[in-house]
Image: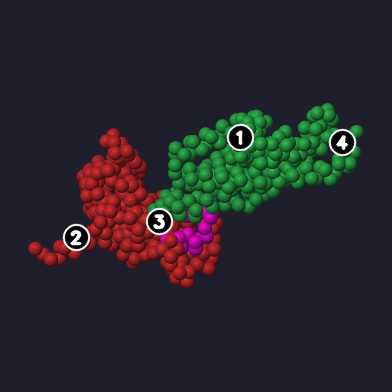
Chain colours: A green, B red
Amino acid sequence: MSAWNFFAEHRAEILEATVNHLALVVVAMAFAIAIAVPLGMLIVHRKTLRNFALGIASIFQTIPSLALFGFLIPIPFIGGIGRRTAIVALVLYALLPILRNTYVGLTGIDPAVLEAAEAMGMTEYQILWRVRLPLARAVILAGIRTATIITIGVATIAAAIGAGGLGTFIFRGVAMVSDAVILAGAIPAALLAIAADLLLGWLERRLKIV
Amino acid sequence: MNPQTVPEKADRTIQFQNVTYSINGTAHHTIVSEIRFSVGAGQTVLLLGRSGSGKTTLLRLINRLLVPTGGQVIVHGRPTTEWDPIRLRRGIGYVIQDAGLFPHFTVAENIALVPSLEKWDADRITVRVKELLTLVGLDPAEFAARKPHELSGGQRQRIGVARALAVDPAILLMDEPFGALDPVTRAELQREFSALARRLGKTIVFVTHDLREALLLASRIILLEGGRIVADATPQEFPRIDHPEVRAFTASLDPLRGAQA
């Protein structure tokens, strides 16, 4: 059976899996951003917390993704089989690029600008919100972009723990030794990644100052 | 006792009382030591010295970006350590070499920063921004809405001065404000600033490594070498002081003569 025929016959199913996949990614990214950006702001002036947070986030990144999904299954509340566990794993994976870029963006500001801000009597809080954050936007978004692309790829593995998404086709195709079925999962996943990259890249350029 | 001496003493806007500053409080990282001088209201004091002589450190001790490790700096009659740093800094204008304008703010927003932190109402801020742009020789209609990257170096530095003057502070601190400009623009800004300073009557502490600039702007020149004051004189007296570092600086005015000496 050719890939094209398989695509045509399973249109509805592929579309549904794509929507599920996208939903996993969007929910996971929303949590990851909600955790990593505030955490990045918090570690600007706190060295111990910074080393701890960046260290932990790096460790999550080094765990092979399939293993991370496996490790989470037996954990109460967040674990088990299904979407919730998958989202937790995807969030842990996405933290590092966002956290690191947030920190780098907030601290990589022209020292003359920070000196002027401090000398004019801005409080640390005002400098963070009115100077550092607006100037770091593009760098933070670059981290979100990297994390999104990673998440779209890793989310295909979420099918292994019953979370659905495009990985379903990939795993089924591997089991059936059918390229057509694998491609039914892999091609839409690749297209999602390219679309996300283009969209976020465009947004990043718009946010860039100068 | 002459009653006149009391107001004169209170008139000393900034006083350094035997000030030492060292990094981490360790003696071998001493940046400035045993600094004693005071600046009267309306004076323009030029801190002159080579790179690393400690002049910027002195400036940063005045607005409490740094705290002395020995002695104290008195501003408006109170040691900086007793001031709330935010209140102290909002009453002191600060201009630095690269202007340090906020790249994401327009010219008007940059100038309006301290007034807006001080919660001025919008109309008052608009009026003040126009006034200041005119004061530094830029047309408000043309420049208010621009971003810093759309300005020349000289224009950026004019905005830097306007921003520092926004809430009409009594003290102005300037750290080589014209140092990065081309010689023609620099001379132009020095002339204009000299006239402006005389007109506004601010107490100014100005850091430079350029004796020519010091002679043009100063009511007093303080020369630093290795973190210590080695000369303190009016521009008229200064070139006649017999000290090797003074001679080094006067020689720098005339490179040819310096080469022969």
The answer to whether dots 4 and 2 both sit on one chain is no
Percent across and percent down for residue B76 are: 26, 59
Dot 1: element: loop
Kindly identify which residue carries mark 2: B9
- Name the mark on residue B240: none
| Residue B34 is covered by the magenta coloring | no
Q: Residue at x 22, y 62 (%)?
A: B11
For marks 3 and 2, give the CA distance: 28 Å
Type of the residue with mark 2: Lys
- Name the mark on residue A3: 4
- Name the mark on residue A75: 1
* Segment colored magenta: B100-115
Q: Chain of mark 2?
A: B
Kindly identify which residue carries mark 3: A120
Q: As displayed, is residue B156 above or below residue B35?
A: below
Type of the residue with mark 4: Ala
